[in-house]
Structures are given as C-alpha cells and as structure tokens.
Image: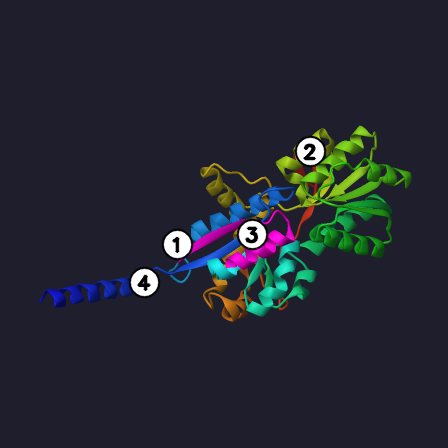
Amino acid sequence: MKIWNAVLVLFLSIFLVSCSGESNETIKIGWVGPLTGDGASFGKDNLLGVTQAIDDINSNWGVNNKQVELIVEDSQLDETRMINAYSKFTQINNVNVILSPDYGGLLAVVDKADQEKVVIVNSLDTSDELARAGKYLFAVGIHDENIGYALADFAIEQSTSVAVIYNQDPITALVDEAFERRYQELGGETVITEGYKDANNDFRTILLKVKEKSVAMVLVLGFDESGFIFRQAKELGLNFTFLAMDTVTSENFFANAGDASEGIYFTSWDATGAAYQELEAKLKAKGTVPQQPLFTAAGYDAVQFVAKAMNGGESGKALHDAMYEIKNLYGITGILTMSPDGIVRTVNEEMYQIQNGEFVKLG
C-alpha cells in the first residue's frame, strides 16, 4: 500500500506540473561583447538593454513558458576571444542563440555558425555587409551604411572637401566607406584618409598630416580613444569643423576629449520617445543609466525580436526560419521588420551637435 501511495503522489505531482505549464527547461541566450577596453562603453550599454529585456520577458511567463537564462562573455573587441566565447557557448553552455554588438567578432565566427546551424545576431548594428556574410547571421539594430550617408548628406552642405581619420575596426571602416562613396557621389572630395589601430592614443602625427592638406572639415570615426584626437587637435591649435558618429556620447569619450568635444557634429537617435523613457525608468530604478541610449535600446529590441521569433522555433533551423517571419514589431527604436536578406533596415540616425555639453538635435 505504501508503494502504491508513493506512486500515486509521484503521478499527481507530474500531472500538476504538466497542467500548470511549469518546466525546468530554460532558454539560454549567450551575449558576448566588449566589457573592457576601448569598446567597453557601447558593450556595457548594449548589455543593459539585453538584460532588461530578459528580465521583462521572464516576469511575463518567459518564452514558450520557459525562463530565459543569460550567459555573458567579454570579447574586448578581440577576434580570438570572440571565437573562444562562441566555442564555450555552443559546446559547454548549449545556448539557443548568440547575441553580440561586436561587429568584427561576429564576422570571425559566421562560417562556423553556418556550418553548425547556430543563429547569431548582431544586437547593435545592421549593414549590407552583414546581410551578405552568412545564412545564420542576423542583425537587429542601427543600419550602419545610413550613418555614413547621413554624415555625407550633412557634410556636403558644409564643405566640398573633407579629411577622414578612422579606427580600422570593421564597423568604423564600413561607415567610412559608405560616407566616402556618398560624399563623392554628391560632388565632394575626400582629400586624405588616415586609419589607425585601437591601441594608438597619440594622433599628433596624423593631425599634422591633415593640417598640410588645408581642409576645414574632418570626419573622425572611432570609439572612446577617438576623444584624444579632438583633445590633441585643440592642443595643436587646429580649428577644424569636426564630424563624428554616435560613439562620441560616452563618459569615457568625454574624459579623453575634455572640453575639445564642444561643437562636434555627430549622428545619433532621438531618445525622448515614451518607449525609451519607460525603459530608462526601469534601469534607473536599478541604479543604472545608459551613457548611449540607442545602444541600450538596440540591445533590448534585439532580445524582444529573437523572443518573438522563438514562438516558431527555439534554435537551429527552426529559429532561423522564424526570424524571417517577424514584420512590423514595435520596438524601442521603432518598427522592426526583418528583410529577406536577414537584417533590419528600419532604424536610422539623425544629425546632432554638442552645444554647451548637451546633445542638440539639428533641424
């Protein structure tokens, strides 16, 4: 009798768990990006959005009644670290999907992801280059070519000649390529283009080479380290009109640039909308405030996009196919639609200027 009672209790326990929809299974999301080094500011802000999105999903029954577990790795914008993180995620953690704002790092693992049918998602940037890169690589975020186009459209109204100084990271190189192509189509001339590596914080030689070309306008594309370019230009008495991209809004950038950041024209995104304000309020309640709101909003939207797709498949080919089905999803950054080539092109940036330390949107 005792045995039958035990069996009955076990049966009822299983039955009740089944009826309640509870499960010990979890959805595992791997996130890898720069948390230290020059790209740390955008990596940390992107991770804030990813983490908050997962918290919101888990508090609302999870994905397919499963809680979402986040596993985090620091890439430091280093391809070897990215490859190692990918291997850990797929061979040890058995994640369902990998998210990353590390543009170059994702390109380093895209072939393995295609071979192993692992869905990887850029949670910050989208580009035509990413669309061509691999079948299992998707991108939900800012359309990077449009950053270059917006800068070129603005620049041609200011001057018909420009100098470019850029970090040779794949993402900034891509923006430079888009800028120069559009700028030349509009009748402008790029007089000199100078690239540099991440570790370089002394830009005086480059700045003096630019000075010799007698240009009035300089486009600077980099991360936190690019703040030294503006500081050193001011120290050298060079009064260029400076253009830049959205990476000039971090605290580390301002620490490096000092008061030389005043007057910079740059691309960014309007964070005054109600959806973002609600997100920021949640983060403030936890004691965190993003330095770069767009990077946080993009991370949030990427998770929500993937979670929506998981209704059609939680990993592998099923998730891959379901990603293409997501259309007109209302996100923090706007209305998100997956293009047939695997990227979202619906998030774009506009021109701003740093005025008295504030980010002022231009008309």
> Mark 1: few, some, or many residues within 10 Å (few <14, many ≥20)?
few
- Specify whether residue 70 is painted magenta: yes
For the residues bearing labels 4 and 3, Cβ distance under 8 angstroms? no
Q: Quadrant of the N terminus?
A: bottom left
Query: What is the CA distance from the residue labelled 2 to the residue labelled 3?
Result: 26 Å
Q: Return the residue at label 2.
A: 256
Viewer-proximal residue among 50 and 85? 85
Which x, y percent locates residue 41?
60, 42
Q: Nearer the viewer, residue 200 or 232?
A: 200
Could you tell me if the residues under marks 4 and 2 are in contact, i.e. CB atoms within 8 Å?
no
Residue at the disc numbered 1: 60
**Location of residue 115 with respect to 208 vertically, above or below:** below
Q: Quadrant of the C terminus?
A: top right
Q: Earlier in the sequence, mark 4 or mark 2?
A: 4
Query: For mark 4, what is the residue?
Result: 21
Magenta stretch bounds? 67-89
